[in-house]
Image (cartoon, rainbow, N blue to C red):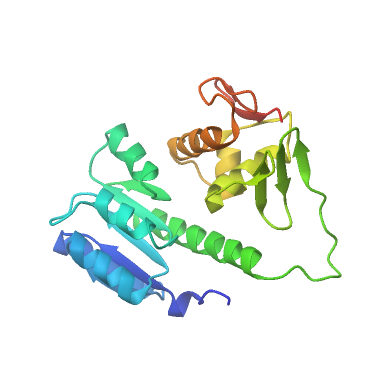
């Protein structure tokens, strides 16, 4: 089933600061979204399970349980896009947020325009991924041949990856990142190019999102993730897929 359009899409705002929560709710309602709010972690988990929102804006510092625990809890049952908010500029907080399952993060203060742009990008990508995974391939559609690199095979039609004949469990963005790199084997792709290709952002954002996902991919497809032979870091430029 196709995802709901903007006027029906639900966004859950999890923020303990009342002024911030109401400001976000006001602006996102003006954008046409149905807005749900929670002021603490346990309430956020309960609302997520009951309402099944299309995207969650999640503050890290929350009463009850913090944003990291909320994210872990949500990720046990849902792949809903999660954008984390942090008042810290500490790299550890940002990376931990991505590692526990967040799709993106913003550091306070941020512009409403940037937040809305990221929300639209995540919802658009989420819809396209769901359509690809749930719709059968029409028989008249030209099928793409699988990409094979030794014991690694990527089926671009079924969005599946196999290693040594075993199906790998990849998150949607992990698959998209691998497919983007593999389809440009031997070419160096910058972090900005990967951001635009995989996340749909056409503006500069922090590169750690790409780096964290690359690290996850290496753990799944490399014989020795600390000494990768498939996804190569090209210092100062980006990443190259060598097969």
The residue lying toward the viewer, choosing from 168 and 134, is 168
68 vs 90: above or below: below
Q: Position of residue 243 (x, y in %)?
A: 71, 31
Residue 109 can be seen in this image: no
Q: Residue furthest front?
A: 165
Report how many numbered discs are placed on residues in the image: 0
Where on the picture, by quarter, is residue 21?
bottom left
Drawn side of residue 164 relative to residue 84, left or right: right
In-image side of 84 versus 79 (left or right): left
- The percent coordinates of residue 26 (x first, y second) are 28, 71
Q: Position of residue 204 (x, y in %)?
A: 49, 41
**On screen, residue 240 above or below 160:** above
Q: Nearer the viewer, residue 106 or 178?
A: 178
Locate residue 216, reporting x and y percent.
49, 37
Kindly identify the residue that appears in the image at 20 percent across and 51 percent down: 66
Q: Residue at x 38, y 50 (%)?
A: 102
- Who's the residue at 60% across and 64% down the image? 128
């Amino acid at each position: 089933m196709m995802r709901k359009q903007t006027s029906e899409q639900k966004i859950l705002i999890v923020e303990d600061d009342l002024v911030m929560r109401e400001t976000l709710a006001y602006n996102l309602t003006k954008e046409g979204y149905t807005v749900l709010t929670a002021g603490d972690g346990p309430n956020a988990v309960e609302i997520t399970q009951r309402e099944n929102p299309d995207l969650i804006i999640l503050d890290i510092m929350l009463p009850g349980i913090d944003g990291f625990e909320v994210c872990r809890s949500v990720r046990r049952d849902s792949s809903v896009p999660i954008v984390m908010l942090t008042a810290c500029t500490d790299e550890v907080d940002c990376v931990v947020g991505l590692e526990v399952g967040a799709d993106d993060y913003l550091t306070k203060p941020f512009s409403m325009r940037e937040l809305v742009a990221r929300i639209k990008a995540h919802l658009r990508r989420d819809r396209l991924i769901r359509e690809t995974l749930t719709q059968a391939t029409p028989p008249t559609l030209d099928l793409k041949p699988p990409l094979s690199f030794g014991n690694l095979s990527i089926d671009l039609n079924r969005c599946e990856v196999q290693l040594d004949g075993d199906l790998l469990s990849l998150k949607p963005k992990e698959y998209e990142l691998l497919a983007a790199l593999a389809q440009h084997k031997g070419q160096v792709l910058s972090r900005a190019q990967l951001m635009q290709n995989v996340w749909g952002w056409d503006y500069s954002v922090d590169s750690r999102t790409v780096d964290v996902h690359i690290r996850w991919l290496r753990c799944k497809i490399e014989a020795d993730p600390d000494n990768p032979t498939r996804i190569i870091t090209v210092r100062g430029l980006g990443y190259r897929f060598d097969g």
